[in-house]
Amino acid sequence: MGERLWKIGEQIVDLSRRGLIMGVLNVTPDSFSDGGQFFDSEAAVARGIEMANEGADIIDVGGESTRPGAQPVDVKEELRRVIPVIEKLSADLKAANAEPAFAKTTAGQAPNAECRMKFISVDTSKAAVAEAALDAGAAIINDVTGGRGDPEMLPLAAKRKAALIIMHMQGEPRTMQTAPHYGDVVTEVADFFLQQYRRALECGVDPMGMAFDPGIGFGKTLTHNIELLKNVARLRVHDRPLVIGVSRKAFLGKLTGTSERSERVAPTVGLTSMLRDRGADIFRVHDVKENVAALRVAEVLLS
């Protein structure tokens, strides 16, 4: 694998030899896997620190559930949920980030593959929430609408020089799983990525700050999910990083014949190893420790 760099704020991270684990932190009462468990801000911060200690490189904080059928949350409530958590997490992670890390400033040093830098991302489709989160210490905007949900999102990412994850979703959370349909899901998702890449460039977003997520389970059937995972390499746009989120998702239960979420951890871990081999760079997961171990072992074998 050649050098693949992702710019996060003033840091440049080399993903070619060391992929990143993004720990899911849902500050919601109704997310599909852990809704309500970390709705209290103190519990959320404690879980964020725990995930960082387990090896998560990014803590992804979200205050609005995007599970199938989820109802929207207004800006005021989403801000109330996520901003105190991001502020406290940011303060608590500064000590860890003060240690030597592989991330480099843009002054010209070469990236080091052994980065231990910790970043916070905000999982939101609202520009007002994203801006407040950046003020509170987040460095990455993770937008499930891929920049389509709020016309101010792409200009905001450009203005603030924030890293941006552009995700594909057919429809919106309330209806996305009603009847997903594609002629060729891989081609259509790849085309969407290229379209949004160009739109982001037009808005002034730094191409080095962009990453792309095919949105497994977001307006996709079981067959669509499998086709996307089989063809991860075809989804890459201009050598930008690929984010994959399969953690504990329902399609894993369909494949394994179980409805227990706890029994989806093993197939998630297996996919982390396999998809690293197929070109994925960032893995959004609930079970950090297990997935970090799988990723690091896979990378030794791939080196």
Image: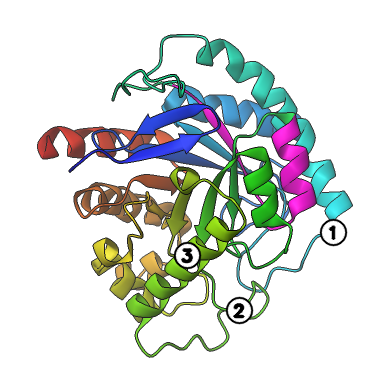
| Residue for badge 3 | 215
Q: Which kind of residue does numbered mark 2 sit on?
A: Gly
Distance between mark 3 and mark 1 Cα atoms: 23 Å
Are the residues at dot 1 and dot 2 in contact (C-beta closer than 8 Å)? no
- Residue 131: say if magenta: yes
| Residue for badge 1 | 74
Q: Is residue 145 above or below residue 143?
A: below
Coloring basis for residues: rainbow
Secondary structure beneath dot 3 equals: loop
Q: Which kind of residue does numbered mark 3 sit on?
A: Gly
Labelled disc at residue 171:
2
Rendering coords of residue 66 (x, y %): 63, 63
Q: Which residues are magenta?
A: 117-135
Are the residues at dot 3 and dot 2 in contact (C-beta closer than 8 Å)? no
Rendering coords of residue 248 (x, y %): 44, 56
Q: Please give left or right for residue 153 compared with residue 302 in the image.
A: right
Rendering coords of residue 48 (x, y %): 59, 30
Mark 2 Cα shell of 10 Å, populated few (<14), some (14-19), many (≥20): some
If you read the primary sequence from the N terminus, does the residue marked by circle 3 or circle 2 appear first? 2
Q: Nearer the viewer, residue 16 or 123?
A: 16
Q: Is residue 136 above or below residue 262?
A: above
